[in-house]
Image: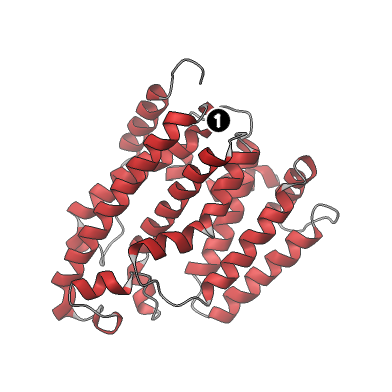
Amino acid sequence: MEPEEICRGTAAPAGSNFYYGTLFQPPAGRRALFALFALLSEVAAALRDTHDRTVGELRLAWWMDEMGRLPSAASNHPVGVEIGELLRARPGLAAELRAFISAAAALQNNDPPETHDQWIDQLAGVHGLIWASAARHVAGADDSSAGCAARIGALLAALEDVQHLPVGLRTGRCVLPAQELARHGLSIADIGQAAAQDRLVSCLGETLTRLRDGLLQAERDLAARANGSLLFAGVMARLGAALCMELAEDRPLLLQRRTALTPIRKLWIAWRTQFSWRKPGR
């Protein structure tokens, strides 16, 4: 497979939210989007899916070195190849990608967030950087629209944290804000205990409601000022909000299975979003 196809398969595999998020995206810039979000996927995997933190740190260090060498040197990694092509066309992006990798490495060593807002701010300082870069360099967005996109990215990353909570608990990692847990009489130490499950379910319900409301507000803010090139962010926000509602209804089983929207529902949400974004001047 060509690097372009591999990046698309990494960022937007068939049936995934990002697959539907980019389904009605204008063709211009889609290759760049897949390259950026494939890089985000690689870094997120290092942050979330590695049981040995040292391995995750090595993976992030490798990507930092790669960002320093590109685009002047060839890459052996398909995502690196596509990022190199992207940097040749948009040299100003290089510093932003290095800042993204550096922020991801710092996040690994951060203490768990104390508040909901601190949690979202932490993620905005990592995942949100890629969303903001995509908004600026792919969609030609101004700083205000890029900020809306970054917030959507941070809220979606928080939603992913919630979905990965069972894996995190098995590896001793809990990203839920300490103050939110305390309001429900919980601590990180007793989250995995059966006796605390009802309180945890209540906490997750409130968290999912806040994430849903944040996503819907961010999408409204973005739609009011953005052009059609940022449609992917609007679709992703609505998909995330719908998933929050689904998870909230299914939250007693959240720690036992992974819930997802059906493909037909994702398609319907994507279609309705792009239809609502068809306004004069977009």
Closest to the observer, 217 or 105: 217
Tell me the residue that label 1 is attached to: 229
Residue occupying the far right of the picture: 72
User: Looking at the rendering, which quadrant does residue 183 occupy?
Assistant: bottom left
Q: Is any part of residue 147 visible from this angle?
A: yes
Crowd tier of the residue under label 1, counting other residues whose Cα lies within 10 Å: few below 14, some 14–19, many 20 or above:
some
**Residue at the spot x=59%, y=51% of the render?**
38
Where residue 281 appears, as percent x and y from the top left, is: 51, 17
Instruction: Return the x and y of residue 231 as percentages of the image width and height.
Output: 48, 32
Q: Position of residue 243 (x, y in %)?
A: 30, 47
Q: At numbered mark 1, what does the secondary structure look like: helix, strand or loop?
A: helix
Please tell me how many numbered marks the rendered image carries: 1
Compared to residue 121, the image places residue 141 above or below, namely above
Q: How is the image coloured?
A: secondary structure
Q: Residue furthest front?
A: 144
The foreground one among 84 and 135 is 135
Residue type, numbered disc 1: Ser
On screen, residue 21 versus residue 209, left or right, reads right
Residue name at image x 22 percent, y 59 percent: 206
